[in-house]
Image (spheres, helix red, strand yellow):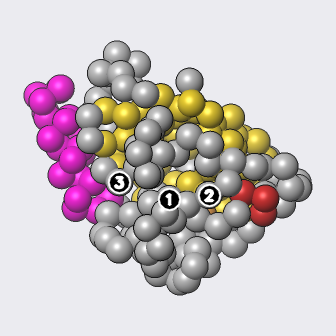
Amino acid sequence: MGRIMQAALFAVGCAALGGCETMKDTADSVGSAVSSGWDWVTGSGGAAAVADVKPTQGNTAAGKVEFRQAGSVVRVKVDLTGLPPNSEHGFHVHERGDCSAPDGMSAGGHFNPDGASHGTFDHPPHHAGDLPNLKADDKGEVHTSFEVPYLSVGSGGSDVAGRSVVLHRDVDDYKSQPAGNSGPRIACGVIVEK
Ligand SMILES: [Cu+2]
């Protein structure tokens, strides 16, 4: 996890829990081992949106991704199953809320309202849709949450509602253009405001 997001998690998590042990993770991906330090269900509730994630043709990854505005940041909660054990995957918000194509290409490119280059989610410049890589546990599942300061829910120029989330077969190297060389799309879900 990068420094900016880590700092944000510290600010929220330390206040909520009175302890920060679980947030001293320095990996640049997130997975089941990372605890966000805040309570998703009872946390302060701004606008929320959810994506029902389904596998693209020939794949098995599926689950749910939720977004909630919390002040100036957006909290993202990810629950996925059906991945190869201990695998790591690029994960982004893509520009079109359309997962109808069998290969997920109908979702378009990365959500990029600012015309930025693809990059690391915690180190501008990067696409608004750039998110941390997701790491599956030994059961092939991802259950994690994190927060980002550059998206919004329900309003604003970086509103995720009406876009889609896309999970890729391979890890995002956070630098290759335009999409981090993360390979085919293995799952896709349209983000719908709740
Ligand atoms: Cu992507």
Displayed quadrant of residue 15: top left
> Of marks 2 and 3, which one's residue comes earlier in the chain?
2
Question: Which residue ends up furthest to the front in the rendered image?
Answer: 156
**Which of 82 and 39 lies nearest the eye of the viewer?**
39
Numbered disc in front, either 1 or 2: 2
Look at the image and give the residue range highlighted in magenta: 1-24
Label 1 sits on residue: 129
Displayed quadrant of residue 13: top left
> Of marks 3 and 1, which one's residue comes earlier in the chain?
1
State the CA–CA distance, disc 2 to disc 3.
15 Å
Q: Give the quarter of the figure containing the N terminus.
A: bottom left
Indicate the position of residue 28 as horizontal and vertical percent values: 37, 63
Seen at 78% across and 63% down, the residue is 105
Label 3 sits on residue: 150
Q: Is mark 1 within 8 Å of ligand 1?
A: yes
- Can the viewer see residue 116 in this picture? yes
Seen at 35% across and 22% down, the residue is 45
Seen at 26% across and 34% down, the residue is 71
- Can the viewer see residue 91 in this picture? no
Indicate the position of residue 57 as horizontal and vertical percent values: 88, 54
Seen at 57% across and 79% down, the residue is 178
